[in-house]
Image: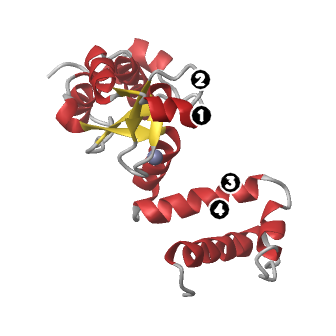
Amino acid sequence: MLKNPWETPEGKAIWKDSKGNPSEAKYWEWLRGSLRRLWSDYPLRKEWKKRQLRPLTKEEKESKLFHPSTKNVGQCSYCMQWFAGSKLECDHKVESEGCTSKETAESFLWHCGGLTGDDFRLACKPCHKTRSYQQRTGGSFEEAHIAKQAIAIQKVKGGDVKWLEARDVLPGKNAKIRKQQVIDKLKEETSGEPN
Ligand SMILES: [Zn+2]
């Protein structure tokens, strides 16, 4: 077995936590970041995405639903809407196990630079973000979608109060309560029935 890089004198000088102590986690963080760059540069991903797109139809061009420079469009696998190619991303069907050990690092290497079209699906940017949020927090895609909407509403100062008042809900006294109120209301609106 090779010596672990983070345990060497050089490694101890490089990978340190905020207190200056040697940190194995910092090593994995560095490796993860480097492998992610491999993914953004993965040529097969780009070629696959290109092949998922189709030219804009005459009707779509006339509809002005897309930017005038749009030539090709593709469909998001989550919301099923059509988007210009530049608004779509390549999403992994199976999430990675992370990169925190030699074993997971090896599978993360293939995750970033060794998978094929069968492992991918197209996602619009908002749905892709929702999917990442869902992977971090667990739960369903729908729940993640609602939680992200609630976060966006609360990003604007006083936004949640206005939003709730517009729906005849008496806003709760703190942000945490109001967030839950927004989530409940969004769920109600999505399902079409009060819960
Ligand atoms: Zn979408």
What's the amino acid at mark 2?
Pro
Q: Position of residue 134 (x, y in %)?
A: 44, 55
Between disc 4 and disc 2, the foreground one is 2
Instruction: State how far apart marks 3 and 1 are (Cα).
Output: 28 Å
Quadrant in which the C terminus is drawn: bottom right
Determine whether the residue tagged by mark 2 lies in a helix, strand or loop: loop
The amino acid type, in three-letter code, at marker 3 is Ala
User: Nearer the N terminus, badge 3 or badge 2?
Assistant: 2
Residue placed under numbered mark 3 in the picture = 152
73 or 29, which is in the foreground?
73
Q: Is disc 4 in contact with disc 2, using a CB cutoff of under 8 Å?
A: no
Q: CA distance from mark 3 to mark 2?
A: 29 Å
Name which residue lies at 59% across and 75% down. Answer: 189
Residue bearing the label numbered 4: 150
Tell me, yes or no, whether the two marked residues, 1 and 2, touch with CB atoms within 8 Å. Answer: yes
Give the class, few, some or many, for how many residues have Cα within 10 Å of label 4's Cα (few <14, many ≥20).
many
Quarter-of-image position of residue 2: top left
The residue positioned 37% from the left and 15% from the top of the image is 41
| Local crowd size for mark 2, using a 10 Å CA cut-off: few (<14), some (14–19), many (≥20) | few
Image side of residue 129 versus residue 162, left or right: left
Asked whether the residues under the numbered discs 4 and 1 touch, taking CB atoms below 8 Å apart as contact, a structural biologist would say no
Q: Depth-wise, is mark 3 or mark 2 nearer the camera?
A: 2
Q: Which residue is mark 1?
A: 64
Name the residue tied to disc 2. 68
For the N terminus, give its image quadrant: top left
What x and y, as percent, mark residue 90?
Answer: 36, 32
